Image (cartoon, grey):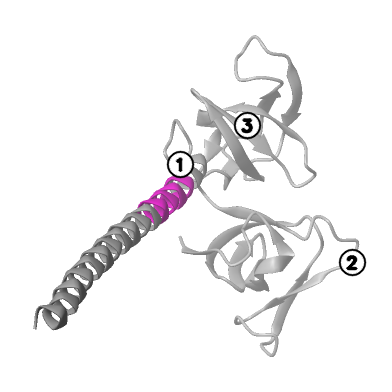
Amino acid sequence: MSMRTRPSRLFSQNAAAIRLVLGAVFVILVLGGAFVGMSFFEGSARASSGGKSAAANAAAMATGSVSGLPIPRFVSLKSDRVNVRRGPATDHEVEWIYTREGLPVEITAEWDNWRRVRDADGASGWVFHSLLSGRRTAQVAPWSKAPSFPLHANPSDNAAVVARLQPRVLAQVDTCDGQWCRIAGKGFEGWMEQDKLWGVYPGEQFDD
């Protein structure tokens, strides 16, 4: 009997030892998996947080530090005499003078009461903020050498042509739907394709 029971006890002890070892291995695996999972989660969270931070930084970079308005953005000249300086202060040399009220320019930077602007020809300099207006204007295809561009009665290629405008004609922009803009000037009013205008962004929508 004892010879038969001894193997049973040995088996039972061995089985218990095996179960103990397996249990320990299981616990290690579970804890290890949890640790890996937590590490992955934390890494993902950091990556996500980093992505959000990058997005937030990009958004911050796209906003003027002084005005809080988007950078870049289009505005127009408020006066028919606007000094453009080399730097953002009156002691900087005047590089040139704009002599066309309503000319569209793009603000690309801000410093105190000064705005760095760029025109349709790519020339850039600093202008005092009070000489700029939020009124939207545009020039008809200043980059083009085409003789003229059609102005339509409605925002459609099939609409009647009410006028033909030469490149660099200056117009006030009343509204844009992302593809067409309604513009007006001396002796004309109608719709022109948005990508034919300098002073509005592709796809931009607004209604003044």
Residue 146's disc number: 2
Residue 12, placed above or below residue 42: below
Q: Amino acid at mark 1?
A: Ala
Q: Amino acid at mark 2?
A: Ala
In which image quadrant can residue 95 be found?
A: top right
Q: What residue lies at 45% left-to-right and 60% top-to-bottom?
A: 208
* Residue located farthest toward the top when viewing the structure as drawn: 91
Alpha-carbon neighbours of circle 2 within 10 Å: few (<14), some, or many (≥20)? few
Say which of marks 2 and 1 sits in front. Answer: 1
Residue 145, placed above or below residue 127: below
- Asked if the residues shown at circle 2 and circle 3 are in contact, with their CB atoms under 8 angstroms apart, the answer is no
Q: What residue lies at 54% left-to-right and 30% top-to-bottom?
A: 110
Point out the tag, 2 or 3, that comes first from the N-terminus: 3
Point out the tag, 3 or 1, that comes first from the N-terminus: 1
Q: Give 45 or 147, whichever is nearer the viewer.
A: 45
Q: Amino acid at mark 3?
A: Arg
Give residue 194's position: percent from left, percent from top: 65, 68
In which image quadrant can residue 123 be found?
A: top right
Q: Which residue is disc 3 drawn over?
A: 116
> Taking 205 as reference, is 87 left or right?
right
Q: Give 107 or 180, whichever is nearer the viewer.
A: 107
Q: What residue lies at 66% left-to-right and 30% top-to-bottom?
A: 81
Image quarter (top left, top right, bottom left or bottom right) of the N terminus: bottom left
In which image quadrant can residue 97 be found?
A: top right
Q: Which residues are magenta?
A: 42-55
Q: Which residue is disc 1 drawn over?
A: 60
